[in-house]
Image (cartoon, helix red, strand yellow):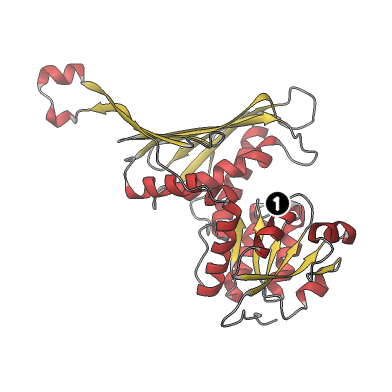
Amino acid sequence: MSVTPPPASGPIGVAVVGAGYWGPNLVRNFQATPAFRLRRLCDLDVERAQRVLGGYSTVQVSAELDEVLADPEVHAVAIATPAGTHLPVAMAALEAGKHVLVEKPLAATYEEGRRLVEEADKRGLTLMCDHTYCYTPAVLRIRELLHSGELGELHFLDSVRINLGLVQRDIDVVWDLAPHDLSILDFVLPPGVSVTEVAAHGADGIGAGRACVAYLTLRLNTGAIAHIHVNWLSPVKIRTSIFGGSKRTLVWDDLNPSQRLAIYDRGVDVAAPEELGDEQRRDILVSYRSGDMVAPALTEREALRTMVEEYARAITTGTPALTDGRSGLRVLEILQAASRSLAEGGKMIKLDEGRMA
């Protein structure tokens, strides 16, 4: 089937598939974004979908995906259904010539995600991952600081995402929480810097039948290291990341709205060996730098609104979204390697450098 072209001018017709936990947030933001016109909401539970829209909406509700995809006024879809359904739903939309936005993760497996990326490429369609955290003002600033070199070369990342619950029935804590941190890492790394291997250790202290606490260690091609802690069992909620650079160190506290970012001009400097005399070489001088802390001002803006606007930009320009299908593939590859490492007692698993991502 040919691509349903969006109008040359005017809003892009969009349908949201899934009216559960995340779907209502997508509905609200599509309705508030001038670049889109929400045409349809699709869910097996029609009454739930109608409650999401309210009593005065002109948006059509349907339980049939085929009916939604057959509508020529629908140029794009946003999928907010369980990960196990992403392949059939997204593939049907692509085959119907629709642009596709998919809630994280892109698919249930790397192979399924690869099929979606190839299909979108073949048809010239936008395939985008809803990695919402990447569109927060804080993460956009972190990306800018790393890409511009203001932090210097990244030496380490320590990230903690812990809270009490919710214990999922179908996936472990790695697949539930780590996609946030992995997508952020993929998003902020400068060009040419990538993850090469991953190890994961986990525990199930409550007999849930899956890891409820996990620690991921990732090695980068620059020699840098990243450590990610995810946990369903912590009575204290923490969402903090530390990006240690050769020039400055950045601390991101997502739960501190008054100061989400703090940049420290503090660190360790080592003199180059050729700059040292014989006696100094024996001591290999290390100096400690203790400068100022700066807290950049951030404009508070809903990340989902920025993400929806990026979806519109990608569709209208025909260029990849910042979090395109390939970024989703890179996250899936790390998740699968982490699962394998968990099963093999924490073994370091090398990523396949030859993959299309």
Location of residue 179 (image quadrant): top right
List x then y, in percent, for residue 158. Answer: 49, 31
Residue 230 in sight in this render: no
**Left or right: 102, with 321 as reference point:** right
Residue 173 in sight in this render: yes
| Residue positioned 33% across, 35% down in the render | 248
Q: Which residue is mark 1?
A: 108
Q: Residues within 10 Å of mark 1 (few under 14, many from 20)?
A: some
List x then y, in percent, for residue 320. Answer: 51, 66
Question: Which one is in front, 30 or 270?
Answer: 30
Residue furthest to the front in view is: 56
Question: Which one is in front, 277 or 181?
Answer: 181
List x then y, in percent, for residue 282. Answer: 18, 17
| Residue positioned 81% across, 68% down in the render | 65
Location of residue 23 (image quadrant): bottom right
List x then y, in percent, for residue 51. Answer: 84, 57
